[in-house]
Image (cartoon, rainbow, N blue to C red):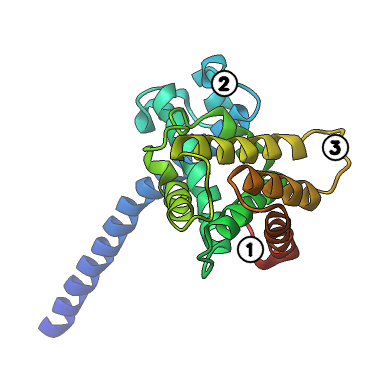
Amino acid sequence: MIYYLDYLVIFELNRQMVRTTNDARRPDRRRSRTRAALLRAGRTLLASRDIGGISVDEIVAAADVAKGSFYNHFDDKEVFAREIGGAVRRQAEQAVAVANTGVTDPPARLARGLCVFVRFAIEHRDSAKVLWRLNAGSTMADAPINRELRHDLLAGMQNRRFHSIDLEAGLLLVMGAVVISMRHVLEERVTTQPSSIAANMAAGMLRSLGVLRAEAHRLAADAAKSVFRGETTAP
């Protein structure tokens, strides 16, 4: 009888511990869902307007959460926008990293990178629009977010794959080509295939960095064929 009572006591204690653990986890799951809903809503809204033109009321309404929830997760709208911008840029950069796995030649890496960004714009329209709307300071050569691009440009200059251009100008040329390509493929009246736009823009970008015409077009064509054939997709 004593053993049976001990068993009941232990059983009840274990049941209470499991229930307490589950109760403790529920708020964390709810908090994560609320945060994710806010970020999704913000990404959609930021695709069409700057953060200054979006109210907290609009954000929580789009996320379908209580207004107070916003300030439980973010100090203000600027912090909110920076987090979205950083997340989108990391998403695109991860896709570039996947596409460039095993590729060491700087011109080939840049060509493939531009093609991935164009494909990213087609597959993630809202994210692409957010990408060029946010990320203040991203044009600076020493910006942490430009680490891989800076590395590729410097490597190309050191081994004379790129020439007659400095780091700052090279970075601005690449970023300019990427952004304008992304914006162009999202225009409603564009009839040219995205893969063709990406290949031609990548070739022009490489030529502006000093790569000879024939090689620039070959590398750009190979990059577009690889990326748009489906060897890599934006995660």
**203 relative position to 145: left or right:** right
> Looking at numbered disc 2 in the image, what kind of residue is underneath it?
Asp
User: SS class of the residue under badge 3?
Assistant: loop
Between the C-alphas of marks 1 and 3, the distance is 24 Å
Instruction: Give residue 190's mark.
Output: 3
Whole-angstrom CA distance, mark 3 to mark 2, is 25 Å
Instruction: List the residue tagged with mark 2.
Output: 50
Horizontal relation, residue 108 to residue 196: left or right: left
| Residue type beneath disc 3 | Val
Q: Residues within 10 Å of mark 2 (few under 14, many from 20)?
A: few
Q: Is residue 59 left or right of residue 216?
A: left
Q: Secondary structure at mark 1?
A: loop
Is residue 78 something one can see in this rendering? Answer: yes
The total of numbered circles placed on residues is 3
Of tags 2 and 1, which is closer to the observer? Answer: 1
Residue closest to the eye, 185 or 69: 185
234 to the left or right of 123: left
